[in-house]
Amino acid sequence: MTERIDPVTLGILWDRLISITNEIVETLVRTSFSSIVRESYDLAVVLFDARGRSLAQGTFCQPVFIGTGPQTMKHVLRYFPPESFGEGDVVITNDVYMGTGHLWDVNLVRPVFRKGRIVGYALTISHLPDIGGRGMSAVNQDIHDEGLQIPLLKLVKAGTLNRELVDLIRKNVRVSEQVIGDILANVTATEVGGRLLLDFMDEYRLEDLAPLADAIVSQSERAMREQIAAIPDGSYRNAIKIEGLDGPIDLACRIDVAGDRLHVDYAGTGPQIRAGINVPLCYTRAMTCFALKCLVLPNIPNNEGSVNPIELSAPDGSILNCRPPAASAARMLVGHFVVPMIFGALADALPHRVQGDPGMMNVLNVVGRRRDGEPFSTLFFSSGGFGALAGLDGMSATPAPANMMCMPAEAWEPMTGMRVIRRNFRIDSGGAGEFRGGLGQEIELRNDTGHPLTVMILGSRTEFPARGMRGAGNGMARVFRINGQPVHAKGRYELQVGDTLLLEDSGAGGYGNPRARAPERIASDLAEGLVSPEAALRDYGFDVRRGRAAAE
């Protein structure tokens, strides 16, 4: 193929690369041992060229990894220059500052060789069921509480597995069969990715990926800069408070736009704390890139070019740029708020693109034994509502800004021995608006294992509910209850046999004046049990008995 790629051919090749990443995702899902990957898709796949530029990301991946994967790749190439790699090598790390911000996400990178030289790299990320230590908890005080730290090491060298490293990991984790199985699934996925990439190059007679990479990156960067340039020049600010462990945490941002350049500064953000909710800068950068790309260029696939125009800074030692030995197991409980904070900052500049605040994900880390005595350590994902947008109601029980799949009862019950007593939408939890915020859900779990369980709750939105946008109402705040009594959203608890845990997930913020909501939409919400008659009258002025707005 010639150096110059015409637009039609570029579209075909670009789509093929994305389809390859999706095949790698399926390999990872089908070969992983833990439900975190198989059921919840807490994973990512990224393909790079020989220079380490990201070209394609799997569709069914965590969106935040648009920002962490390329940073990990840069660290890999800094530590392992290309000449230090051989065919069949695979590098592993879970370093929180090189990877995704916490120890549970393992990153594997495989160089892809063609005719004796590296033509690209395949990177996979998946969330392990355990990494040792005290577990995935917000109450950890420093990183040494949290588990095993794996620096950049060769897990596989010339096709031979590093058995000593595998044994070291095995000795330091719970449910070691699942942990090692998931790591080896990543090895397999990178191997499949390398083979598919070589088949792709053979099919299209590509001696090198560089011309294709140049076209993908340059076109994406040009499109991103054009959209940034369409934002009026100026400084856009926002500041919010979120709940911590012992009091509120301040987050602040200033977005400076000048032509096609954009810089986000997090000055004014509070300091890191002795708890497991600190955020390494790599994760802050990733969330920043994700938020801005959603607003200005949502339809271009993720790659290096779409993040190149974004610059950021955060005070050293702040909770959005923590320093060792800060704990960061639950870094998403702070890091996820970067997205609605940026949306709020740009709400006046891009009023028809922003959304009401999301209800956010909720995670339970549950460790214990099944009824047969077999140990388990796993995560239960659930979600609040998705924020409403101009013209669209928010989706209910839909995660944002993450996109993990919520754990199905059919998988959870046999895996853990816990019983899902009920699961339903939480009526009236979505923020009222011309377009209603998505509802949270209510999930009640009971310990039927016959053994005590340790439950680490990783939740937010209990004190500061999801805010509505442009005159809309807020979502309902989240509540956790053990045996009917409220408990802290970031606590560690023992669940005795027969005890129940109730999750009342938060609703999302609405969009626009509630009194402008179409009566037929209100009637539909009433019919589906999403809004009560009392809330319809209070928030929308809709009288159920009259079937129309009370003011009419």
Image (tube, rainbow, N blue to C red):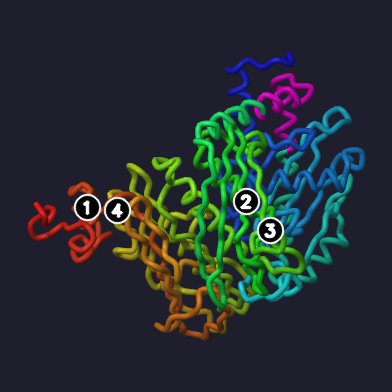
| x then y, percent, for residue 548 | 12, 53
Mark 2, residue position: 265
Residue depth check, mark 2 versus mark 1: number of the one nearer the observer: 2
Residue depth check, mark 3 versus mark 1: number of the one nearer the observer: 3
Mark closer to the chain start, 4 or 3 = 3
- Please tell me whether mark 1 sits on a helix, a strand or a loop: helix
Q: CA distance from mark 1 to mark 4?
A: 7 Å
- The kind of residue tagged 2 is Asp
- Please tell me whether mark 3 sits on a helix, a strand or a loop: loop
Looking at the image, residue 365 lies above or below residue 495: above
| x then y, percent, for residue 53 | 73, 36
Q: CA distance from mark 2 to mark 4?
A: 31 Å
Mark 3, residue position: 315
Q: CA distance from mark 3 to mark 1?
A: 42 Å
- Please tell me whether mark 2 sits on a helix, a strand or a loop: strand
Mark 4, residue position: 433
- The kind of residue tagged 3 is Pro
Find out whether residue 199 is within the magenta segment: yes
Residue depth check, mark 4 versus mark 3: number of the one nearer the observer: 3
Q: Residue 338 is drawn in which quadrant? A: bottom right
Determine whether label 1 and label 4 are within 8 Å by CB: no
Q: CA distance from mark 2 to mark 3?
A: 9 Å
Find out whether residue 287 is within the magenta segment: no
| x then y, percent, for residue 151 | 82, 58
Judged left or right of residue 513, residue 89 is right
Q: Residues within 10 Å of mark 3 (few under 14, many from 20)?
A: some
Mark 1, residue position: 515
- Please tell me whether mark 4 sits on a helix, a strand or a loop: loop
Mark closer to the chain start, 3 or 1 = 3
Q: CA distance from mark 4 to mark 3?
A: 36 Å
